Amino acid sequence: MSESEKHAIIILAAGESSRMGEPKQLLQLDGKSLLRHAVEEAVGADIGPVIVVLGAFSDQIVQELHGLPIVKVINSDWQQGMGTSIRKGVLEVQKNHNTCQGAVIMLSDQPFANANLLKKLLKIFYSSKKPIVASAYKGILGVPAYFHHLCFVSLTQLEGPIGARKFIQQHAKEVEAVPFPLGAVDIDTPEDYARLKEKIKGK
């Protein structure tokens, strides 16, 4: 892939997982942590630099990223909400990866988000010419989602708890959707984690 065709992937992994009671980035699924799974899928998509935004428990979580070809960014304002992590990630792209045409934003707790989905978002961006391509699940549009660099200035102005989903809603006319029903599966509580383990075990 040439420099002019690169697209960054920003993985948000800065939260403290208050409802889980432990860092959900480190929860194990099929012998691998959720965060490492997300990062390996992002690297495997091979569309450009992978940026991981860390915050709470960063000293502990960073060990999960050993040996992976990524850029680590620490968000010291993580307690203010997801908007600050998006801002940090996008600022990193603007500053050090400014040949990227855009960026995919994804979470570390959507276990079914994979490299094929990330590449599909990019494919739909090229065919639709829409500046935002979002995953569609459970009646909403959310992440993983692709944002053209024309969105970057607005994304760097996000504050507090305003995340990518709200940004997508605010720019609905500029969004193309990609069906991703399993995007509804995320892990916020111990009950979510137990159900997911049972589901995977039963396959």
Image (spheres, rainbow, N blue to C red):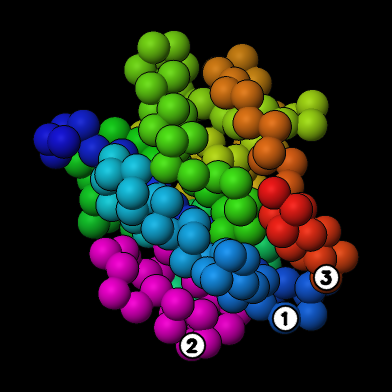
Q: Earlier in the sequence, mark 2 or mark 1?
A: 1
Is residue 160 visible to us here?
no
Query: Range of the magenta residues?
Result: 52-73
In the picture of the structure, the residue carrying the numbered disc 3 is: 190
Q: Earlier in the sequence, mark 2 or mark 3?
A: 2
Q: In this rendered view, identify the residue nearer to me: 149 or 8.
A: 8
Quarter where residue 123 is shown = top left
Distance from the alpha carbon under mark 2 to that under mark 1: 14 Å
Whether 65 is among the magenta residues is yes
In what element is the residue under mark 2?
A: helix
Q: Is residue 95 visible?
A: yes
Q: Residue 59, labelled with which disc?
A: 2
Which residue lies at the image location 53% right of the left edge and 36% below the top edge? 145
Query: Height in image: 128 above or below 51?
Result: above
Contact between marks 3 and 1 (CB within 8 A): the answer is: no
Q: Amino acid at mark 1?
A: Glu
Q: Label 1: which residue? A: 22
Front disc: 2 or 3: 3
